[in-house]
Structures are given as C-alpha cells and as structure tokens.
Image (cartoon, helix red, strand yellow):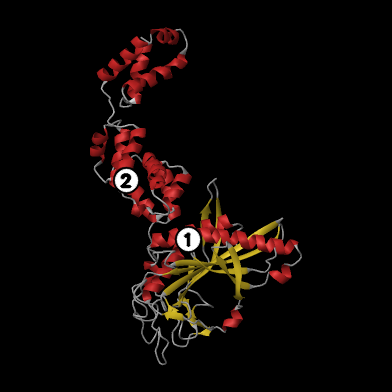
Amino acid sequence: MFETVIGLEVHVQLNTKTKIFCNCKTSFADHQNTHTCPVCLGLPGALPVLNKEAVKKAMMFGNAVEATVHKKSIFNRKNYFYPDLPKGYQISQFEIPVVEGGHLMIDFKEGGQKRIGITRAHLEEDAGKNIHEASCSLVDLNRAGTPLLEIVSEPDMRSADEAVLYLKKLHAIVRYLGISDANMQEGSFRCDVNVSIRPKGDEKLYTRVEIKNMNSFRFIHQAIDYEVQRQIEAWEDGLYDEDVWQETRLFDADKGETRSMRGKEESADYRYFPEPDLLPVILDEKMMEEAKNIPEMPDAKKERYVTEFGLRPYDASVITSDVETARFFEEMVSAGAEPKEAAKWLTIELQGRLKGSAGIQESPVKAPQLAKLVKRIKEGVISAKAGKDVLDELFVQPEDVDEVIEKLGLKQVSDDSAILELIDGVLSSNPQKVDEYRGGKEKLFGFFVGQVMKASKGSANPAKVNELLKKRLNP
C-alpha cells in the first residue's frame, strides 16, 4: 500500500493596473506586443521600479491565511532562460519572501476539515507568451512583467481530491480579497503540481515529479491520478529508480497522461543572488495596518451562516466557496427570503439549471427575483412544485415573478369555502371509503388529499386541504 504526497505551487496573477516593475498596462487578449517598454523588453540601462499595489495585495493574502508578513523582504535574480522573458532572468523573491507560513482549511463533503500548511508566498514577474505556428514560434510580451504571487504549499495533501479542495479554497480566498480575477481559462490562476509516493507508514519524502502549468481543476485531478499510478507501477515493477526521477512533466489532456518535458532544476541551478537594481522592500506601520483591513473570508462567512442563519455546515460551505454565490445569497436574504429556503433554492434549483460551468453571475434569474419566488412559496401563494415551473419560465423570459404566476395559472386556492366545496364533492363521491376511514383505516387520508388536489387541478393549497379535510373527516 502506498501513500500519495502532494505539494502545490500556485501562480496568482495580481489585478494591478500596471506591471510589477514598469508602467505598462496589464492586459489579456490585447493586440500582441502593444504593452511593452524598455523595462519589460529587458533593454540595457532600463531600471525596474516596484509596484506598491502588488506588495499591498500580497500582504492582504498573508493576513488572510494567518501568515507572517515580513517588514523587510528582498528581490532576487533567478537565472535561467525563458524564450519569452527577454532579460534572460526573472526577478523573484527567494531568501526573504514578503509572506511566510500560514495555512488554510479544506472542507470535506462528508464532514470534517483538514489543515493545509502554506510555506510561503512571494512576488515575481510573469513571463510572456509563446505562440507556436506551423513552421515557427512567435513571442507576445504583453504579459511579461505582470505581477505574480506564487503561493507554495506544504506537502500536506494525500489525494487528488484534497489537492482540488485546496485549490478551490485558495481560489475563493484570492477572489474574496479582490486581489485577482483568478480566471483559470486566461491563466490568472495556474499551478505546478508536485507528486510523489511512499509506502504507507514511511515518513521519508521520495522523488517528486512536477507537472507544469495546470489551469483546470478537472485536468489537475486527472494528472495526479495518472502520475500516482505511473509511479506505483514503476515501484512494483522494480523500476522506480529508473523511471521516476526529478523532472518536469506536462499533462496531455487528450490522452489523459503526463509526459516528460525536462529535468527539474534545483535552487542552486538558478544561481539566485540579490537583485542589484532593487532596494530591499521595507514596510512601514501604516502599510502593515492597512493590509489587515481585509473582507470577511470564506471560513468566517461559513461560520456566520451556520450560527446566524441556521444553515447546515455543508450548505454554508457550498455557498461561501464562491464570492459571487455568497453575494447572491445575502442579496436574497436582504430581499426578505427565509435563509434556509434561500439556500435550498439557490444551491439546488437555480444552480442545477445553470448549464455547464456557468457561474452564478451568468444566471438570467437575479437574486431579487429568486427571493420573491421563495417568499411566494412561503406565503402559500404557490406550491413548491409550481415554484419550479415559475423558475423554468424565468430562465426563458425574465419577467416579474407575480406576472409569471398569473400567466401560468399557478396561484394556489387558499380560500376555505372553495376548498371545502371541493372536499365535500370528493367525500360525497366516495361514501364507502369515508366509512372505512372513520372505521379506523386512516391510511385512506392520503387518497382523499390526492382526490381533492386532482379536483383542484393542483391549485389548492395542500396545507389548507390537509387542515380542512381532517375537520370534515373527524367531525
């Protein structure tokens, strides 16, 4: 039996207006090489100037994960060739990062949590982008110099599931903080996955393999599962030392497998030394205090939803896992929806109708509409079953909830006299069953309820039907 050991290096693209060491605009999908200057082109004599906002955003992250934010940190040169970073080296942090230590908690669906340690989070510049065509490669340097926060975890994860839970929690934290859009499709949130195995009970760390530049939760899960199985098979076949060595691999999503890219460098291979063109970063007390002013984080919000609104921990975890979903829920509650019902209709009915990976912000039904629908069900205006029909209609045509209820004829009959008339009709048509019920066959009560609802074509208020039917059958 083997144990999996996983550590993650996540690169978060910070959403500053300009690059980390120059005034060039940060952008995605603009025309190639339009946001460049002597600094990000690496021209001789061009000097970097640190972006203060990038430092502030890194500090906010440090406070959010209860890490140490160093008052003094330094930048280093990391020397190795990037075809899309013209300087021939990367400015990064090595010896003293701005953020060190910290942790976050992952939540399991079946209940319980696990603490995942964070080793460090350091600032660095992003490389550009290679564009490979049939017979040549092109380079777009718009992204070169974009500020990155690299977040390095401890090797605390023991499965692909735990790794994905960690990444989703980390993704939520940076989105809550507002320090990155964390758009995985655009590469704003991507990670390198370090995977190794060891016999169960062994505390030794064996050879780790790095899977580079992953930007999909699904593909990360697949890549880890494949790599773990590859390493186990090598161990069992007696080929571990031959087939598993410290290297960088890529994941082929079409084939569902990892393949070798290059040997993995050690830190000495990068020949780190202090960046001579940048002074040490010294944080004053004002910046340290300002960076502590962060919004409510997912775990704190989850706890508040459980204590203040009485939600189940898992439901609260689902809602708070995404900042837009949490805002949607709170807007529903502010509009008068009962919290537990709001949670149910949001997480089950609404999100169940959103196709594919569409986020809550893409929902055609907005929070005030869904809140109004939940209230109408609570008020007995329509049944929960009819509410689903209303929601389906709202997805097609964003009308007023009350107008849709009227248009579809779904308004419940709650008038006592109207319902009693239906009840009397059903009882008079079934005298034998009435006698059997009054003779002790109480299971027939459900039959009478069904007949009344059928007679009303589903429009009678079920609670009223039950209440009045009991009075008629038990005079």
Residue nearest the viewer, comparing 219 with 132: 132
Question: Which element type, helix, strand or loop, lies under badge 2?
Answer: helix
Q: Quadrant of residue 236?
A: bottom right
Report x, y in % for residue 345.
Answer: 38, 41
Report x, y in % for residue 284.
Answer: 39, 75
What label sits on residue 395 in the rendered view? 2
Position of residue 372 relative to residue 420, above or below, is below
Can residue 472 be seen in the rendering of this structure? Answer: yes
**Residue under label 1:** 170
Residue nearest the viewer, comparing 255 with 294: 255
Please tell me which residue is depicted at 35% across the width and 22% down the height of the picture. 454
Count of numbered badges drawn on the protein:
2
Please tell me which residue is depicted at 47% across the width and 88% down the height of the picture. 276
Residue nearest the viewer, comparing 103 with 399: 399
Quadrant into which the C terminus falls: top left
Please tell me which residue is depicted at 57% across the width and 82% down the height of the picture. 270
